[in-house]
Each structure stands twice: as structure tokens, then as C-alpha cells.
Image: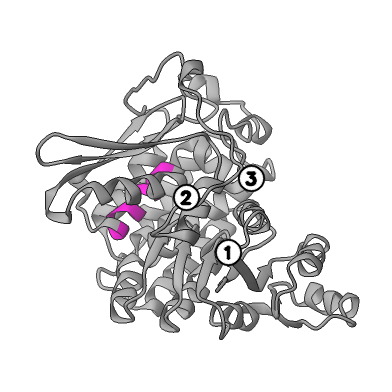
Amino acid sequence: MKKKISILGSTGSIGTQALDVIRNSKDFEVTALTANSNIDLLEKQIMEFKPKLVAVADNKKALELKKRMNLYDVEILAGMEGLLAAAREEECEIVISSIVGMVGLKPTLEAIKHKKTIALANKETLVTAGKLVIEEAKKNKVNIIPLDSEHSAIFQSLLSGKQNELNRIILTASGGPFRGKNKDQLNNVTFRDALKHPNWSMGRKISIDSATLMNKGLEVIEAKWLFDVDIENIDVVVHPQSIIHSMVEFVDGSIIAQLGPTDMRIPIQYALTYPQRKQNNVKKLDFSQIKALTFEQPDMDTFPCLKLAINALKAGGTMTAVLNAANEEIVKLFLNEKIKFNDIPMYIQRVMQYHNNIINPTLEDILQSDKWAREYIIAQF
């Protein structure tokens, strides 16, 4: 029997690569797809993969797509209700949560409540509401399998031991396009410079987060919830070659690492086939071509976003939601050339300082804190 897959965010970087994995396998069937507004690509995906249900976040674009697909047997919905419907689609077994941003939280929770296995690429789900999401997953006996390369590496490496044997998690970071530079050298870099990631092909927002090291900070927060570890047991090390995707150290000093080429289709496929592994057409790693594997400490003076994320996690409560919301809005400003690169952490820190943290938040508290942080940033400009 083919596994039934719903993809939230099918036109984005992760979504398109997930469809490539599905395209090259006979093991999967697509039951639902969602997109924000890219209906040109979504239309092509509908025609190729023939899902039963499609949702478009943008209401006008959803109406336009309905007109285009009038002769096709597909249900087309709009807005958040459409995303929620795709998340709970009846036949679906695995939901790939790859919507970028806070908008992915509610659909992911909806999928969990309907007992779907979650292949998680949406960082904001655990960054903003990790405690609530993990509690809901445990209550519904739902597996959350990480899709991004670092957490997939940790997930795989942890299979070598037991939870009570774990000493620490070691997250690797490429260092981004500005590794080795100081603050003065970053004063006048443009968003185009920041988008030039040395190893990975990613979307615009995550590429900027990689350049600021915020991406690694968000991954630290995710790791805390995914793997039930304290912040003191999570380390970050810069590994420019991006061949070791992350590591775990057990209490006896043994370190288990997951290595591979920089191709997101590997962790995506593993999440979909887990606990089995399947053959694929991804180019394999050639060790004879690897000249060195190097490591260094992250420079948190030049890239303070990593430290801000760690501080937000230590503060707990709604602080991580505020960190995330502020970062999303500020990255938009940088991409629109309204602020400079070095302004990004400055504004995030300012929002965090003014936030009245709620230590044991409800979902509504988290959503309100997210809204407050965005409005605070928007009011500055």
C-alpha cells in the first residue's frame, strides 16, 4: 500500500523537494497540497500528482485557481480553513509541515489532533509553542519526525543509544556566507549577499536566518523540544563543509554523527520511509574528494542572533514566540532594503526587552504575543 502524503507548503523549497522524492518513488501518493499564492506552480503540481484537496492561503488566488481547474476533480479551498482541512485530510497518513512562518502552527496542531504522523520542517511550530505541541503529540501518540538536515541527523544518531545514555547534542552550522567577517565588514552587505549560502539551496527567509545565525538559534530551541534535552546539553559548532549534519555524544564519550551530501531529499525521504531506508538517485558522498573536516566556535559577538535565541529559550514562556515573530518581520524589512544587516539583532533584542513574558502560556497567549511583536516592529517603520 502506498503511503498517503499531505504537503503543507508544496510550492516552497522543502515542498518541491518532497515532491521530487515522491516523483522518484512508487511508495507514496499525494492526497493534499497547499500553497500561499504561487498558483502557477501549484497548478502544475495538481496536474502531475492529482491530489484530492488543495488549499491556497491567498483567497483571491484560490478563486483564480478554481476557475483554472474547473474541469479537474479536485477540491480547492482558501485561507486558514483550507490549510486546516489539508492537515486533517481523511486518507492522509503523513503530513509534511513545510509552510514557512508562524502560519504553520495551527495546521500542524490540527494534523496532530487527527493523529497524523508529522514530518516537520516548519521551525516556528516548536520554536513558538514547543511545550504545547509536544504535549499534544504525546496525548495523541503521534510521531514527529524532523525534516531539516540537522535534526534528522540527531534523530538518526540517537538510534545508536537510549535517551538516558545521551550526554549532549552537537548541532553543526555552516557559518553562512559571512563566516569569518567582523561587524564592521557587515555594515553594508546587501540581502543579495546574504542569500548566497555557500552549501545549501534554500528559501529567502531561511537563507537570511542562516547568514545571521538565527537559523541555528531556532534549531537549538527545536532540539530542546524534539529530543527532550536541557539547553546546557546542546552545543553549536561551526562546520563549514556541511558534511557532518549534526552529532550526539553519549555518556561513555562515544560520538555518533550523520554524514551525507548537502541534499535535502535525503532527510525528506528518511522521514517518509522511517523506520526503513530506501534506494534513491541522490549523488553519494565521495570521501576521496573531501580534503578536510574543520570545526570552530560560532562568533556570537558578530552574529548575536544565536545568543538572543538561547536567551529566549532560557527565559521560556512566550519569549521564543516574540523572538520568532520579531525576526520574521525584521527579515522582511532587510529583504526590502529598509534596514541594514547589523540592525537585525538590534531590533530583535529591543522587542524582547519590552515584552511582558508569560511563563505558562496558552495557545491564545502565544498567538497574541506573536501579534504584539509584529505590531511593535511595524509601528517602528
Of labels 2 and 1, earlier in sequence is: 1
In the image: residue 299, left or right of residue 277: left
Q: Is 335 placed above or below 352 here?
A: above
Q: Position of residue 244 (x, y in %)?
A: 39, 32
Which residue occupies 53% across, 65% down? 96
Q: Which of 115/222 is in front?
A: 115
Q: Is 54 placed above or below 291 here?
A: below
Of circles 2 and 1, which is in front?
1
In this figure, which residue is indicated by the disc labeled 3? 204
How far apart marks 3 and 1 lie (CA) works out to 31 Å
In this figure, which residue is indicated by the disc labeled 1? 27
**At label 2, which amino acid type do we have?**
Asp
- Asked if the stretch drawn in magenta spans residue 268, the answer is no
**At label 3, which amino acid type do we have?**
Arg
Mark 2 secondary-structure assignment? loop
In the image: residue 361, left or right of residue 378: left
Asked if one can make out residue 28 in the rendered structure from this viewpoint, the answer is yes
Mark identifier at residue 153: none
Of labels 3 and 1, earlier in sequence is: 1
Quadrant occupied by the N terminus: bottom right
Of labels 3 and 2, earlier in sequence is: 2
**At label 1, which amino acid type do we have?**
Asp
What range is drawn magenta here? 216-226
Q: Position of residue 316 (x, y in %)?
A: 27, 60
Which residue occupies 86% across, 75% down? 64
Q: Quadrant of residue 85?
A: bottom right
In this figure, which residue is indicated by the disc labeled 2? 148
Q: Which of 308/58 is in front?
A: 58
